Structure formats: C-alpha cells, structure tokens
C-alpha cells in the first residue's frame, strides 16, 4: 500500500505554496468566505459592493440572520430570516453622517467614536457606537494564519450595558462577533475553521 502521508509530504515540499493556496484571501469574498463555528453553525461573508460585505449566520437548520457591514466592520443593516426568507419586519438600518468609505480603518490600540442613526421600521433613534481596538495578534484556523485586531464595541445609550467583542482580520477586510455581554447574559461564539464557500 502506498504511503499516503509520505506522498503528501513530498508534494508539499515540492510545492510549498500548495497548502497556503487553500487559505482564503480577500479576493475570495467575491465567491464567499465561510467560517465554521462550534455546534455546527456557520457564517459566510460575501462582497456586496466596494464598501459593504454581507455576513449570513446560520445553523444546520438554515440561515438565521444577515448583517451588512460597512468596510467589513461597521453595522449597516441587520435582518432575520423566517422560514428560509428574509423577514422585512425585522430589519434594522444604521446610517452614518459620513460616506461609508470615510469610516475609520481599525488600527491596533486605536479607537473610534461614531454617531449612528438607527431606523427600526420607520422609527428613528440616535446612538453613539464606541470602538476600542486592542493590540494586533495572530489567529489560526488549521494551517491558515491571519493577523487579527480585537475590538470592544459599546453603545450609548444602552439600557443593558451591552458590549460586543469582535475580531477584525485586516488581510481579509472583515470582522466577526466572538462574544456579546449584557446585564442579563453572556454569549460566546467559537470560530473553528475557514474555507472558500461552495
């Protein structure tokens, strides 16, 4: 029987870029980049326009929500799925007093304080979103390693002292939610794998 492990090792030695080629790059956002999350959940990111990504979160039962992210970081729209279709009654739209391409690029140990208009079914309200970025680190998904900048996001006003914890991957131009904490609860999301979407 051939030694498969030896054959694979020989292939990678002969072509060291073969393994790296499996790791998604920002160009793959055109087709979609999919993260596997604990408990069988997933999140798939695709490019919607020059300044906006769509992130669809789902489980084994199907998609649950879609978030539009300006510059891959800032909330632009949140909408839920109902019976496999987007539910317009659940839509939240976030507006900014500046063009989307003028929103700040996350930087290590930086911060941003951004005024936001929230539209919930025609009801408008004003919020301030406060971003605090931490030091740059590295996050690994199997053989794929990416630079990562952690972010804490607070909201004013906030009735429940909510804080969201994000991880920004500058090489991919996207961010994902790893934890939400508020007065009555604390939810964490463990991202386990990365691949180009099918």
Image (cartoon, rainbow, N blue to C red):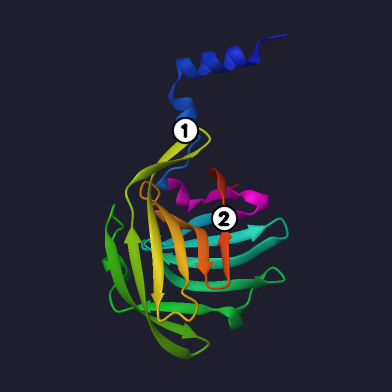
Let me know if residue 36 is in the magenta part: yes
- For the residue pair 124 and 188, the one nearer the viewer reads as 188
Crowd rating for badge 2 (residues with CA inside 10 Å; few <14, some 14–19, many 20+): some
Quadrant including the N terminus: top right
Disc number placed over residue 103 in the picture, else none = none
At x 46%, y 84%, the residue is 119
- For the residue pair 38 and 96, the one nearer the viewer reads as 38
Q: Measuring from the top left, give residue 5's x and y in whole percent.
A: 61, 16
| Span of residues in magenta | 27-42
Q: Nearer the viewer, mark 1 or mark 2?
A: 2
Q: Circle 2 sits on which residue?
A: 189
Is residue 165 at all visible to an observer of this figure?
yes
Let me know if residue 49 is in the magenta part: no
Is residue 73 at all visible to an observer of this figure?
no
Q: Look at the picture and state if 145 lies above or below 17.
A: below
Q: Look at the picture and state if 78 lies above or below 54.
A: below
Task: Check the image and name the residue furthest to the front.
Answer: 183
Picture quadrant where residue 146 is located: top left
Crowd rating for badge 1 (residues with CA inside 10 Å; few <14, some 14–19, many 20+): few
At x 50%, y 79%, the residue is 92
Picture quadrant where residue 137 is located: top left
At x 33%, y 62%, the residue is 132
Q: Measuring from the top left, give residue 11's x and y in whole percent.
A: 52, 17
Q: Measuring from the top left, give residue 31's x and y in whole percent.
A: 51, 50
Q: CB of mark 1 within 8 Å of CB of mark 2?
A: no
- For the residue pair 146 and 3, the one nearer the viewer reads as 146
Q: Circle 1 sits on which residue?
A: 21
The span from disc 1 to disc 2 (Cα, nearest Å) is 27 Å
Mark 2: which secondary structure?
loop
């Amino acid at each position: 029987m051939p030694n498969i492990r030896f054959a694979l090792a020989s292939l990678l030695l002969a072509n060291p870029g073969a393994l790296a080629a499996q790791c998604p790059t920002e160009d793959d956002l055109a087709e979609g980049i999919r993260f596997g999350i604990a408990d069988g959940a997933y999140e798939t990111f695709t490019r919607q326009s020059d300044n906006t990504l769509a992130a669809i979160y789902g489980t084994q039962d199907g998609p649950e929500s879609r978030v539009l992210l300006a510059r891959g970081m800032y909330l632009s729209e949140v909408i839920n799925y109902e019976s496999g279709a987007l539910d317009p009654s659940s839509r939240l739209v976030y507006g900014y007093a500046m063009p989307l391409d003028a929103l700040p690029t996350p930087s290590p140990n930086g911060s941003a304080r951004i005024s936001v208009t929230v539209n919930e079914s025609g009801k408008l309200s004003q919020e301030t979103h406060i971003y605090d970025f931490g030091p740059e680190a590295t996050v690994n998904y199997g053989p794929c390693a990416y630079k990562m900048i952690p972010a804490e996001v607070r909201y004013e006003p906030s009735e429940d002292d909510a804080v969201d914890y994000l991880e920004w991957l500058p090489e991919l131009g996207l961010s994902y939610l790893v934890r939400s904490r508020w007065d009555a609860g604390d939810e964490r999301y463990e991202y386990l794998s990365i691949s180009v979407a099918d």
